[in-house]
Every structure is written in structure tokens, then in C-alpha cells.
Amino acid sequence: MAIDKEMSPIEFRLDPSSGVPTYLQLVQQVEHALRLGYLKPGDQLPKVRDVVAALTINPNTVLKSYKELETKGLIEGRPGQGTFIKTTLEQVTLPDLATLRRTLMSWLASAEAAGLDEDGVAALFTSVLRDFYKERSGANAPATGGARGVEGIA
Amino acid sequence: MNVIETADLGKRYGKAWALRDCTLAIPEGRLAALVGPNGAGKSTLMNMAVGLTLPSTGTVTLLGGMSATAPAMLQDIAFMAQDAPLYKNLSVADMLHLTKNLNWRFDHARAKARLVDLGIPLKKKAGKLSGGQQAQVALTLALARRPRLLVLDEPLAALDPLARQDFMGTVMTAMADDGVSVLLSSHALADLERVADFVVVLGGGELRIAGDTDELLAEHRLLTGPASEADRLAGLLSPIQVKRAEAQAHLLVRTGGPASAPVPPGWEAHPVSLEELVLAYLRPTGIGSSSASFPRTELTEVTR
């Protein structure tokens, strides 16, 4: 199904076996495309009607994902024109990134000196990363869809 | 605004109730799927909603409070009965002409353009078209009346998978273009997961559950754990459905809300699919829960 006129740089697809709700799949695909640079500020998202026709999904589902992206400040609707990318997801400037990378390298060196191997480092990092963001988000953790995987017991 | 609202709605044929005590509100702009086995009362509910059958008890109102039998309602509702009802001996063009003259509001140009778009030969007799094409013709005629509410009784039953997708594509596009609200009954649960943003589950002439699809999915969890604890947990959680083997048990429970309630120790919680959810409500095997009501439970209670 070709989208005529103003082509959007991306096209959505759905993974029926992922268990992730449809609207969330669309949200994640836009975020992913932003991180990877497929989408830049000013780019147009596919029109609701085109997404509906291409994927045979409920228009409210598409509207819901666009609303969520708008709430996150990533996109904006321009009346009569469509929906456009407002910002980028790369929040960190390049010099900052280089500094962060250096600190991480020196931390890795001390971890190795303390006797951790690569798997040990990865396990520790993953665990700390999870705890850090869990603490941050606190009690109002996003169960709205973000946590629809298996909720096991720690 | 609610497109359909019922209060204690019931229909009795002789001594048998086809539908009873049905209280329901479907908001506008949705595609509401009416699901349930044969004899669940789906067609009865639909026929009362469009004014073809009169209720034995209770009331049904449409589009924000109007009576289902009011003549003015005829314009705003389009109803497509099962098996794509067309005059089989008329050509598609004649069918179009006839429907135009039988209706006060009818977008002839648009209907014709849509049929041409779909590659349906206008000169062919309606009865000679494929099942999928007949369904598309009936749908096009219904939509050309520019209804505010489109009611479709088992439109997908006779269609192959490709024709189903095309049909739903037309329905979804009409929703996006015109904002028409849709009530659709179907057996094909798997086809509905992506299209229905509201579900109404009927079983044995009773309303089992109704609500926003995403909200219902977020509120339900499948708990998996040791069978030895299943009874104790079931007593606390009033599950909708319990499935157990010798060692392992699955409990489908409704939690207080979308919040990620703590899971009892030793148990795992999984999200449920729309199909699992509907089937659980159609075959409730809850322990300690009465068959008529499905109480919400707070998972937190068990962990204290």
C-alpha cells in the first residue's frame, strides 16, 4: 500500500506475537526511529487514515499512540497539515557523551582490577540500571503498558 | 455521548429468555465487538438496538438518548444483517439505484467510486459476485447513507481471511474518515484484537463483561503457580477462571486497576490476550466466585 503525496520517512509494522499492545508498538517504533535517526524534527508521521488502511487497525489506536507521543513532547499536530516530529531523542551533546564514556571506561578498569569478568560486569550493570530506574519512577511505575511482559517475583 | 445505552434490557420468547438484565453503555466513536457463542443473545441485542425487535423488559436508547424505534433514527443507523443481504438478481448498478431511491440521504457518487475502487463490476448481478464482493457491496450501500451508527451482524462469518481483512479495512477507513461508530458481532475473536477498542461479551443470554479493550486487558492477569496453593489463592482472589493440573495451576484474575499489583510469592503474573479474556468469561470456572458476578480483587490483600 503506497502512501501518496507527502511521504513519511517511516512505515509502521505490527508484531502480532509480541504481546505488546498495538498502540504501544507504534509509540515504540517512533521512538526507535528517532534514536536511530530515521526521523528528524520536522519530519511528518504517516496520516492516521494511511496507518489505518495499511495495517487494518482501529483509528482510535493510532490516535492513542499519537496522543501519547505528543504528551511525551516528541511530536506535534498541526491542524490541517498532519503530525510532525518536534524534537529528537538524543538528549546528550557529543562532548558530554565523550566524558561519560571516559568515566565508564575507568570504572570498567577498576571492576576488572577487582576481579569481575565481562559477564560479571554485565550482570552488575544490568542489576544497578534496573534498581536505579525503579527507584526513580517510584510507586507510580508505568504499568500503563510499559510493564506488560512477565512480571515475575524478584 | 453513548451511541447505545441499555437498562435492564431483556427479550423473552415464550418461556425462554434470549437476553435478560442487560445494562450496557457503548461510547461514541468506537468499534464495539459483540462476542459470544451461538444463542448468546447477540442478534437479539442487535435487533432491539436497531428497532427491529421490541424489548420484553427494560429500555434501549441510541445516539445520546433517542428511542430505537423513532422514525428519525432510521436515517442515522445503518444495519447490515447476516449474509450480506442483497437482491441477488439485480445488477450492482441497479442495487445502487434502488438503494438511492429508498433512502433520503445517500451519497451515490461516493458509493459508486468506492465500488469501482474495489474493482467490483457494476453490471454484474449481485448474486454472481464472490462472497467478499457481496459483503463489500452491502457495506458500501450502508455507508453511503452516511450513518452515525453502523451495526453489522456477523459480517465476517462467510468470508475468507483476505476478504475479512479487506472488509475490516473499509470499516476502519470509514471510522477514520467519517467518525462513524460501529457495533459488530463476530465469532472470529482473533480477527478482533486489533480492530475492536470496546468489547461486549454475551453468554447464555446474559452480559458477562463489557468495557474498553485496553483497560480490560490491563486489568486482567493470568497467575501461574503451584496447584497446592490454588484453592487458598482462589478463595482470596475470586478468579474468573481456574485451570489446574497436578502440579501447576493458572488463575485468571481481575485486579483493581491497571496498576501492577504485587504478585503473591511463588506465582508469576502474565498479561492476557483478548481471546483468553473472552473465553474465560464465557467459561467461568471460578472457585469461590458466584457465577453471576465477577468481583474485582486487590492482589495486595494476599501478600499482607
Image (cartoon, coloured by chain):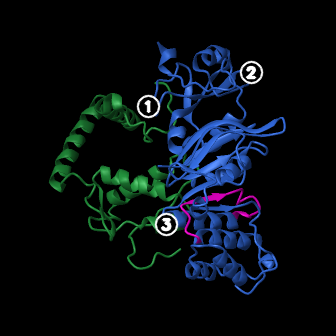
Chain colours: A green, B blue
Residue at the farthest bottom position: B123
The secondary element bearing badge 1 is classed as: loop
Q: Nearer the viewer, mark 1 or mark 3?
A: 3
Compared with residue B228, is residue B94 higher up or lower down, i.e. above or below? below
Discs 2/1, front: 1
Up-down: is B246 above or below B51?
above
Disc 3 chain ID = B
Which label number is shown at residue B259? 1
Counting from the top left corner in percent of width and height, residue B48 is at: 68, 49
Q: Marks 2/3: CA distance?
A: 54 Å
Which residue range is magenta in the image?
B145-161
Say yes or no: labels 2 and 1 on the same chain. yes
| Residue bearing mark 2 | B246
The residue closer to the viewer here, B240 or B290, is B290
Query: Which chain letter goes with mark 2?
Result: B
The question of residue B45 being in magenta is answered with: no
Amino acid type, mark 3: Asp
Q: Specify the quadrant of the image occupied by residue B277.
A: top right
Element at label 3: helix
Q: Which residue is mark 3?
A: B178
Q: Amino acid at mark 2?
A: Glu
Mark 1 belongs to which amino acid? Ala
Residue at 34%, 53% in the rendered image: A69
Alpha carbon distance from label 2 to label 1? 31 Å
Position of residue B94 measured from the top left corner of the image (x, y, whole percent)? 72, 83
Tell me which residue sits at (45%, 38%) in the image: A147
Q: Nearer the viewer, residue B119 or B303?
A: B119
Q: Check residue B152 for magenta coloring.
A: yes
